[in-house]
Image: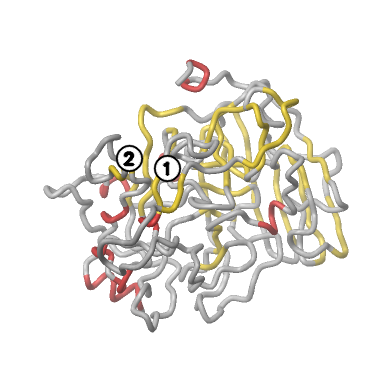
């Protein structure tokens, strides 16, 4: 790791502007119809559109690294971002300002409702000495429209969190009721993204750098899929920033059996250098908003879709309630069970897979050390050790209800 990657220089204070392409702002101003107020990022105090294009049909490049607010009279989206000194303060109600799928639906029985998010994130992330692995129900970050990036799902083989097989929200079976934005809804009404949010990002062109889509809980920015081929040269062309995870070869030795096909998190392994991104699905590079370079995360079209690790120090305000307590390890090395915290509950599956919901307890855990024999597969580290996401039977029963 180079000195720049360890402690990247802070970029100069950027101008607060928004560049709109294709008529409307997909990143901030898209709504099904009606009026969207976006202030603080443009010369004019409002962006108005009587008729918006369908989700994913508009391209927008945005610079929203300063303070701004969103008020959408049609979708109800409300968000205030205040940048002061080294802090980015975010207040949002979590309602998306773009078209969504129908909720409830057969795979997701929940209805979207307003939330109350309040986060104080570092304006400039700081790399930590080791990665921190996400574990349920910790979200990863927040988008520029106030919707959370929340990749983990509390769905397991035979509905058993002790099985060691965690069902992926974006998988070949597609049983969790995701819409075209790779999103669905928790029992609390929280709409959240499990992958690239197409309604927010618009059409991502392979010839242009991704727009800034949000921030992780450690303050580092979040982009999607496309970036500069040479991370330090914006004139080097655009590449698809592929992850360094791949499907394991062969068949599962236990649990559900069968070939590794991406149904379960444990079907994947991290292979350093396999793609262009690191284990946290990020890299240090220059971006349109950070011409001097910054570490940043990338949402990808393939696993892990949304990063499963924090490379920096997570802001206290972003740690899910109870996480600090649940960092403690039981004598057998597994995480201690926490209080039930139901999320994204899906209807019971006839196959016996899933049904527990999209999160059962709060914990943010350090990544196991490299070389841990429990994580070593064919000479490479296992990407995620989520078996520690345990709940007691009473908690699991409550989540199913």
**Is residue 155 something that shows in the picture?**
yes
Are circles 2 and 1 on residues that touch, CB within 8 Å? yes
The mark nearer the N terminus, 2 or 1, is 1
Which residue bears the numbered disc 2?
367
In which quarter of the view is residue 111 placed? bottom right
Closer-to-camera residue (392/268): 268
Between 266 and 161, the one lying in front of the other is 266
Q: Residue at x 66, y 31 (%)?
A: 229
In the image, farthest residue toward the left: 331
Q: Which mark is residue 98?
A: none
Q: Quadrant of the C terminus?
A: bottom left
Quadrant occupied by the N terminus: top left
Tell me: 56 left or right of 165: right
Q: Does residue 308 lie above or below 258 as drawn?
A: above
Q: Quadrant of residue 155?
A: bottom left
Question: Which percent across, then down, holds residue 134?
Answer: 39, 48
Q: Nearer the viewer, residue 16 or 185?
A: 185
């Amino acid at each position: 790791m180079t000195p720049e990657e360890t402690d990247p220089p802070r970029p100069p204070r950027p101008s607060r502007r928004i560049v709109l392409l294709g008529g409307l702002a997909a990143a901030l101003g898209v709504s099904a119809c009606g009026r969207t107020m976006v202030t603080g990022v443009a010369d004019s105090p409002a962006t108005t559109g009587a008729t918006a294009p369908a989700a994913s049909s508009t391209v927008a490049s945005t610079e929203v690294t300063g303070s701004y607010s969103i008020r959408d009279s049609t979708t109800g989206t409300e968000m205030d971002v205040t940048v002061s000194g080294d802090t980015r303060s975010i207040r949002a109600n979590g309602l998306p300002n773009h078209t969504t799928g129908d909720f409830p639906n057969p795979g997701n029985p929940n209805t979207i409702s307003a939330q109350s998010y309040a986060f104080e994130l570092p304006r400039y992330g700081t790399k930590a000495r080791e990665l921190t692995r996400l574990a349920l129900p910790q979200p990863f970050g927040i988008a520029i429209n106030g919707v959370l990036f929340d990749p983990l799902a509390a769905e397991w083989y035979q509905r058993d969190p002790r099985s060691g097989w965690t069902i992926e929200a974006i998988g070949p079976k597609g049983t969790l009721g995701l819409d075209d934005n790779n999103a669905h809804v928790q029992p609390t009404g929280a709409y959240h993204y499990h992958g690239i949010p197409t309604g927010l990002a618009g059409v991502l062109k392979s010839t242009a750098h991704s727009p800034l889509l949000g921030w992780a809980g450690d303050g580092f920015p979040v982009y999607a899929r496309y970036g500069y081929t040479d991370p330090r040269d914006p004139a080097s062309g655009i590449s698809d920033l592929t992850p360094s995870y791949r499907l394991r070869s062969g068949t599962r030795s236990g649990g559900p059996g069968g070939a590794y096909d991406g149904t379960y998190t444990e079907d994947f392994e991290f292979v350093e250098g396999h793609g262009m991104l690191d284990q946290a699905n990020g890299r240090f590079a220059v971006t349109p908003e950070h011409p001097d370079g910054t570490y940043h995360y990338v949402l990808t079209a393939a696993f892990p879709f949304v990063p499963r690790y924090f490379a920096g120090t997570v802001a206290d305000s972003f740690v899910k309630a109870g996480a600090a307590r649940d960092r403690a390890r039981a004598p057998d090395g597994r995480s201690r069970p926490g209080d039930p915290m139901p999320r994204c509950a899906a209807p019971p599956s006839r196959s016996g897979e899933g049904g527990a919901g999209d999160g059962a307890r709060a914990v943010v855990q350090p990544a196991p050390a490299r070389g841990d024999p429990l994580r070593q597969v064919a000479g490479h580290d296992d990407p995620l050790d989520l078996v520690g996401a345990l709940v007691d039977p009473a908690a699991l029963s409550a989540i199913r209800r």
